[in-house]
Image (tube, grey):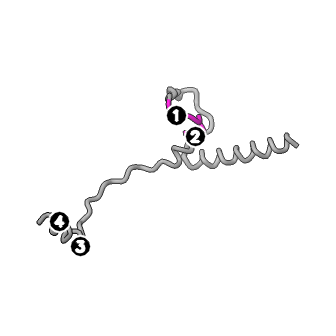
């Protein structure tokens, strides 16, 4: 029974990992030439957490200057005078 549960869990984890790796474009096995990164003291969770975080992370948005509405300009005028 325990073996069956273990097999089921490992199958689910394996398929989830495959899906994440497919989305991030990362490779499952590292080549010999790739340089290993030094461990960060503050980070925890290991490789899986790092892969998930890379998949979730979005690029920074460019700031856009917003034009004030007529109501906001009038409110500003009232406050300053």
Q: Which residue is mark 1?
A: 43
Q: Position of residue 2 (x, y in %)?
A: 85, 41
* Closest to the observer, 57 or 43: 43
Residue at the (69%, 47%) spot, across then down? 15
44 relative to 17, above or below: above
Q: CA distance from mark 3 to mark 1?
A: 47 Å
What residue would you read off at disc 4? 79
Return the disc, 2 or 4, that comes first in the chain's sequence.
2
Task: Establish if 77 lies above or below 36.
Answer: below
Residue in front for this viewpoint, 75 or 6: 75
| Circle 1 residues within 10 Å: few <14, some 14–19, many ≥20 | few
**Label 1 near label 3: C-beta < 8 Å?**
no
Q: Please indicate whether residue 73 sits to the left or right of residue 20 in the image.
A: left
Earlier along the polypeptide chain: callout 1 or callout 4? 1
Identified at 72% across, 47% down, the residue is 12
Residue 19, above or below 73 = above
Q: CA distance from mark 1 to mark 4?
A: 47 Å
At a point 50% along the width and 31% down the height, the residue shown is 42
Q: How many marks?
A: 4
**First of labels 2, 1 by sequence position:** 1
Q: Dot 4 surroundings within 10 Å: few (below 14), some, or many (20 or more)?
A: few
Q: Nearer the viewer, mark 1 or mark 4?
A: 4
Which residue is tagged 3?
71
| SS type, badge 4 | helix
Residue 9 in the image: state x and y as whole percent: 76, 45
Magenta region includes residue 44 = yes
Q: Is residue 33 magenta?
A: no
Labelled disc at residue 49: 2
3 vs 4, front mark: 4
Nearer the camera: disc 2 or disc 4: 4
Is residue 67 visible in the rendered image? The answer is yes
Q: Which residues are magenta?
A: 42-50
């Amino acid at each position: 029974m325990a073996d069956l549960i273990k097999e089921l869990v490992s199958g689910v984890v394996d398929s989830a990992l495959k899906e994440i790796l497919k989305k991030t474009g990362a490779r499952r096995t590292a080549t010999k030439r790739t340089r290993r990164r030094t461990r960060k003291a503050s980070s925890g969770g290991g490789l899986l957490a790092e892969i998930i975080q890379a998949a979730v992370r979005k690029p920074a948005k460019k700031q856009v200057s917003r034009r004030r509405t007529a109501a906001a300009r009038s409110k500003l005028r009232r406050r300053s005078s």
